[in-house]
Amino acid sequence: MNLNELKPNVGSTHRVKRLGRGDSSGHGGTSTKGHKGQKSRSGGYHKRGFEGGQMPLQRRIPKRGFTNIFKREFAVVNVGQLNLLDKGTTVTPELLIEKGLLKKMCDGGLKILGGGTIDRSLTITGARVTEAARKKIEAVGGTIA
């Protein structure tokens, strides 16, 4: 089979409506667009959101708030999730990504939260730690560098 031998399945296509080819075609004259008016012209239709001259919805609703361009997102991990690591491990953001505890690093860095319990001593480096998480990690003999 060659490219020049390809054909659509029988019955899967229909004839194209040929517009503006004389009155005998059934689609001559106005080319099925009716008579005159904005919608019959080329390029003639109102813009998106236009409501016939009424004040559009997106202009009637008040604007609220703002976007803080200095906001920093943190990649977060709970203390309970660190139980998946071996005892005495040095926890770094790269290690957590490698082990699948984090998908990716965010611009604010890593933050360890106090959710869950931990039963092994670990060394935490390169991360922010909440006060609750710090107490739990240090209670089992872990350190935060």
Image (spheres, grey):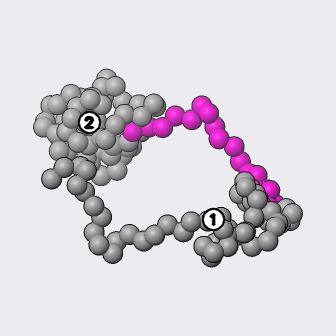
Dot 2 falls on a residue whose secondary structure is helix
Give the residue number, with chain letter if any, for mark 1.
21
- The quarter of the picture where the C terminus appears is top left
Give the residue number, with chain letter if any, for mark 2.
97
Asked whether 55 or 10 is in front, the reply is 10
Q: Say which label, 2 or 1, has the lower sequence index.
A: 1
**Is 135 located above or below residue 32 in the figure?**
above
Asked whether 96 or 22 is in front, the reply is 22
Callout 2 touching callout 1 (CB < 8 Å): no
**Is 4 located above or below residue 50 in the figure?**
above
Q: Which mark is residue 85?
A: none
Chain part drawn in magenta: 56-75
Q: Where is residue 25? Give x, y as percent.
A: 60, 73
For residue 110, side relative to residue 140 (left or right): right
Residue drawn at the location 72% of the way across and 69% of the way down? 29
Queried whether the magenta region covers residue 68, the answer comes back as: yes
Q: Marks 2/1: CA distance?
A: 65 Å
Which quadrant of the figure has residue 47?
bottom right
Q: Where is residue 62? Give x, y as percent.
A: 79, 56
Residue drawn at the location 54% of the way across and 68% of the way down? 17
**Is 142 located above or below residue 47 in the figure?**
above
Asked whether 14 or 71 is in front, the reply is 14
